[in-house]
Image (spheres, helix red, strand yellow):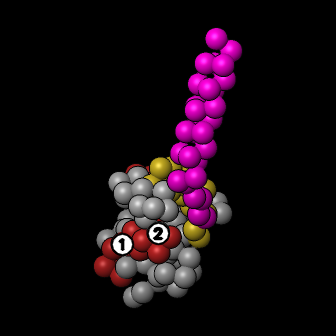
Amino acid sequence: MKKILSITLLLICSYTFAQNKKSAVLVIKTSAECDQCKKRIESNLMYEKGVKFCKLDVPSKNLTVTYNPEKIQPEQLKKAISKLGYDADELKADSLAYSKLPECCKSGNGNHHE
């Protein structure tokens, strides 16, 4: 009985370890301004294949994304954010998407496309 329990526990631990290896965490600096931005970015990013979790800290503008690197790459994550109208690290916001954002979501620092 002890042997069966030990083997079962070993299999569960091995499976859990294997699952964890398929996760990576990336922190992306965004141009988000408010809670509307937070909701828009988090909800849309969850539709990207391979994204497991994301959370935007509005005051710091840092978006933390947990994802499966076998399904999506950091560049794809940044591009998805850009297509929503926000900067993502060095990648500037898509001009058309930015122009469609509510005024409260537009940065006042002037580093976006006109």
- What secondary structure characterizes most of the magenta part? helix
Q: Is residue 1 above or below residue 32?
A: above
Give the image location of residue 91, x and y in percent.
Answer: 49, 81
User: SS of the residue at dot 2?
Assistant: loop
Q: Is residue 11 above or below residue 70?
A: above
Residue at horizontal 60%, vertical 39%?
14
User: SS of the residue at dot 1?
Assistant: helix
Give the image location of residue 73, x and y in percent.
Answer: 47, 69
Q: Is residue 53 above or below residue 71?
A: above
Residue 34 numbered tag: none
Q: Quadrant of the N terminus?
A: top right
Q: How many neighbours does mark 2 have within 10 angstroms: few (below 14), some (14-19), or many (20 or more)?
A: some
Three-letter residue code for mark 1: Lys
Res 106 visible: no
Q: Quadrant of the C terminus?
A: bottom left
Give the image location of residue 111, x and y in percent.
Answer: 52, 85
